[in-house]
Amino acid sequence: MPDAPVLPADERAGVTARGADPLISARGVGVVRGGQWLIRSIDVDVAPGEVVTVIGPNGGGKTTLLRTLLGLIRPSAGVVTRRPRLRIGYMPQRLVIDRVLPLTVQRLMTLTGRRSRRDVAAALDETGVGGRIDAGVDTLSGGEFQRVMLARALLMQPQLLVLDEPVQGVDFTGEADLYRLIGQIRARHGCGVLMVSHDLHVVMASTDRVLCLNQHLCCAGAPHHISRHPEYLRLFGPRAAQAYAVYEHHHDHAHALSGEVVQAPGPDGRHDCHGHGHHHRQAPGTDSA
C-alpha cells in the first residue's frame, strides 16, 4: 500500500512540525480482523499542545485507530510508542447508561476512581456544567452530557486528551462552542488533543493537523491544504472544498446551555443576554450544548 501523501514539515501546522517530542506515536500500525485489514500502514504523532483530528468515512477505521493508540487493541503490525507515564484522558464515542438506575453526575464522574467533590466540581466548572453536579444523568441534554464526559476526561489531569466524536448529539451551534472549549482546554493545560470527528463543517477550522483515514492514511497535513487535496475531495465530494470556510463564526456573542444568545465575556468576565440578527442551522433531533 502506498504511503499517505504528507505535506512537507514546514507546511504542516502544530507543534510536531516544530520538532517537539511527541506524546504518542505510531509507525506502520495495522489491525487485522477476520482476515481483513481494518487499518493498515498508519503513521501518526501527537505533540504537546497540538490538536490532531482524524476524519474519514464510516467504517474507515477511525475508532479502531484510537483504540489501538490507547492500547485497547493490539496492533497486528507496526508499533505504538507512548511517552513514559503518559496521562491520558479518554472520552469514548458511546457510553451506555441504564436510564432506570438513579445515577447523578457526581456519581458518574467517580465510577472509575475516587475523586473529591472539589475536584469533580472544578472539572465540571471548566466545561461549563458546574451547576449540574447533583443532577440526574437522565435529565441532561445532549450537550450537557458531552460536557460532563469531557470533564470526566479532565479528571485525569491529562497530558493527552483522546476524544472520539466529542460533539455527537449536539446541535450545529453547540458543536462550534464545544470545539472552541476544547481549544481553550488545550491552551490552558498545554495538552495534546487527538480526536475523531465527522463534523467537517466545523472541525477544519478547529484543528492544527488533519488525518484523512480510509483504512490507510489518504492524506495528512494542515487543514487549509487538506481541504483542497484530491484524496479528500474524492472521499467527501466537491462540496467538501468549501468546508473549511463554512463556519468562521466571527461575532461578539456565545450561547448558553439552553441555546440562548449571550454576549462574549467582557473584561469583568460577565455575560449579558442580547438579540441578534442572524440565524444558526440546527440539525433535527439534537440538543444544544
Image: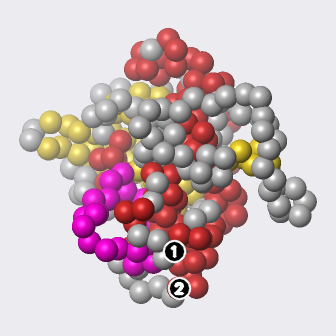
Tell me the residue that label 2 is attached to. 117
Q: Amino acid at mark 1?
A: Ile
Tell me the residue that label 1 is attached to. 133
Q: Residues within 10 Å of mark 2 (few under 14, many from 20)?
A: some
Q: Secondary structure at mark 1?
A: loop
Nearer to us of marks 2 and 1 is 1
Q: Looking at the image, do the residues carrying marks 2 and 1 touch, with CB atoms under 8 Å apart?
A: yes
Q: Is residue 182 left or right of residue 166?
A: right
Q: Is residue 190 magenta?
A: no
2 or 1: tag closer to the N-terminus: 2
Near-viewer residue (78 or 259): 259
Q: Secondary structure at mark 2?
A: helix
**Stretch of the chain drawn in magenta:** 79-107
| Residue 94 in view in this figure | yes
Which residue, as the protein is rendered here, is positioned at the far right? 267
Quadrant of the rendering where the N terminus is positioned: top left
The image quadrant that residue 217 belongs to is top left
Near-viewer residue (14 or 196): 196
Near-viewer residue (207 or 150): 150
The image quadrant that residue 112 belongs to is bottom left
What distance separates the C-alpha of mark 2 from that of mark 1? 9 Å
Residue 275 vertical position relative to residue 129 in the rendered view, above or below: above
Q: Position of residue 8 (x, y in %)?
A: 61, 32
The residue at 51%/88% (across/down) is 116
The residue at 46%/54% (across/down) is 141
Q: Residues within 10 Å of mark 1 (few under 14, many from 20)?
A: many
Q: Position of residue 213 (x, y in %)?
A: 39, 34
Q: Is residue 100 magenta?
A: yes
Residue 152 vertical position relative to residue 204 in the rendered view, above or below: below
